[in-house]
Image (spheres, rainbow, N blue to C red):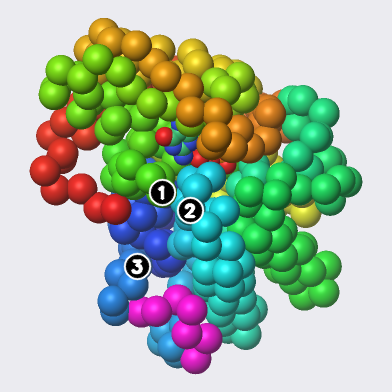
């Protein structure tokens, strides 16, 4: 059964961000051209009443909640209040309005960091809420867990076919390349590129290099979201990943190669490693007929190309 019709009006909350813009592109490419988006200057998603009025006015057939306050390990550790408060407010405002106006289809996006720090690898969906969280992003994770439970509660209490997806670490065009507050992949692309261009002899990378991470290109996530919106209707927040991970050391070497940096890598072990490993078990989404297509090598090369042509004009 296809739960999304070509004429459906779809509101993509957060349509100018890394994830939202990719979902917008994927929906448009698949022929859904009745899309709605608002920038944060036009609609503050933390404002419960404004969001309610917006949803009432537009009465979309589906809402994709891709708006969130996100950041890397440093940003999460330094500003936990924003990460819990903004995210709770954004998702409560959007989900409350969607329920009040009985929006039939909602896709909420969680994150792989909501799983317990020491979850068995690869992480199965059943690991949710079975152990303590990674302290560096506990505030963000708790907000996202609340969103997932809100979606499940709406399903059980009101019978609406709302769903959640759990993406692994994402990257791609339009990412935040801030040297201090971004995630590791864009942060390192920028640092290695700057070092390669200035002729620096070394680049500092945080931690020990031994943590393992799985990286999903945001265009793959976007295709997964369209697929799930069309065909998935289950209580379980479904994992979306590649099923393959690399060490931060391997990632740094790949990025050095892509950017043409030939100097040495220095590990700053005063910086936290975070969770030791975060690889999602993607067997459930594979069973629904979807798998990631963009390899890390391919995705790194195209993201670097994007970065090079937008270098002078980046956000963050
Ligand atoms: P996490 O997956 O939530 O831990 O988020 P990050 O993407 O911020 O970090 C992933 C891993 O990369 C952690 O072990 C970091 O210590 C490591 N890392 C190495 N260099 C950097 C860097 O320049 N920026 C960030 N954000 N992380 C880095």
C-alpha separation, residue under disc 3 versus residue under disc 1: 29 Å
Pointer 1: what residue?
A: 181
**Circle 2 SS class:** helix
Residue depicted at 26% across the width and 8% down the height: 262
| Residue 123 falls inside the magenta stretch | no
Pointer 2: what residue?
A: 75
C-alpha separation, residue under disc 2 versus residue under disc 1: 5 Å
| Residue 316 location (% of width, % of height) | 29, 53
Q: Is residue 224 among the parts visible in the rendering?
A: no
Residue 22 placement, left or right of 4: left
Whether tag 3 and tag 2 are in contact, CB under 8 A, the answer is no
Whether tag 3 and tag 1 are in contact, CB under 8 A, the answer is no
**Is tag 3's residue or tag 1's residue first in the polypeptide sequence?**
3
Q: Residue 112 or 9: which is nearer the viewer? A: 112
Q: Nearer the viewer, mark 3 or mark 2?
A: 2
Whether tag 2 and tag 1 are in contact, CB under 8 A, the answer is yes
Q: Indicate whether 160 appears above or below 2.
A: below
Residue depicted at 30% across the width and 70% down the height: 39
Q: Is mark 1 within 8 Å of ligand 1?
A: yes
The residue range painted magenta reads 43-49
Q: Nearer the viewer, mark 3 or mark 1?
A: 1
Q: Residue 75 or 86: which is nearer the viewer? A: 75
User: For mark 1, does the 10 Å Cα neighbourhood hold few (<14), some (14 to 19), or many (20 or more) residues?
Assistant: some
**Circle 1 SS class:** loop
Q: Is mark 2 within 8 Å of ligand 1?
A: yes
Q: Indicate whether 301 appears above or below 130.
A: above
- Which mark, residue 36? 3
Residue 95 placement, left or right of 120: left
């Amino acid at each position: 059964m296809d739960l999304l019709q070509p004429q459906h009006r779809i509101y993509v909350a957060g349509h100018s961000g890394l994830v939202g813009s990719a979902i917008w592109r994927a929906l448009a490419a698949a022929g859904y051209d009745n899309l709605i988006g608002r920038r944060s200057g036009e609609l503050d998603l933390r404002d419960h009443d404004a969001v309610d009025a917006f949803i009432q006015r537009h009465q979309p057939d589906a809402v994709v909640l891709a708006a969130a306050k996100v950041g890397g390990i440093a940003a999460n550790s330094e500003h936990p209040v924003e990460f819990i408060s903004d995210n709770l407010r954004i998702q409560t405002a959007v989900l409350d309005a969607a329920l009040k106006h009985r929006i039939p289809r909602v896709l909420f996006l969680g994150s792989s960091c909501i799983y317990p720090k020491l979850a068995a690898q690869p992480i199965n969906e059943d690991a949710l809420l079975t152990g303590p969280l990674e302290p560096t992003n506990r505030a963000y994770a708790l907000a996202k867990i609340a969103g997932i439970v809100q979606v499940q509660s709406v399903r059980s209490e009101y019978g609406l076919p709302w769903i959640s997806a759990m993406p692994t670490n994402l990257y791609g065009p339009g990412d935040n390349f801030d040297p201090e507050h971004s995630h590791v992949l864009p942060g390192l692309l920028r640092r290695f590129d700057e070092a390669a261009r200035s002729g620096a002899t070394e680049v500092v990378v945080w931690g020990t290099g031994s943590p393992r991470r799985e990286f999903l290109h945001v265009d793959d996530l976007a295709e997964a979201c369209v697929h799930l919106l069309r065909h998935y209707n289950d209580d379980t927040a479904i994992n979306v990943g590649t099923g393959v991970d690399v060490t931060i050391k391997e990632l740094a070497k790949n990025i050095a190669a892509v950017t043409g940096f030939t100097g040495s890598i220095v590990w700053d072990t005063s910086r936290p490693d975070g969770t030791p490993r975060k690889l999602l078990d993607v067997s459930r989404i594979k069973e629904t007929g979807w798998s990631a297509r963009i390899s890390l090598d391919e995705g790194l090369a195209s993201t670097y190309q994007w970065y090079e042509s937008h270098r002078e004009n980046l956000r963050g």
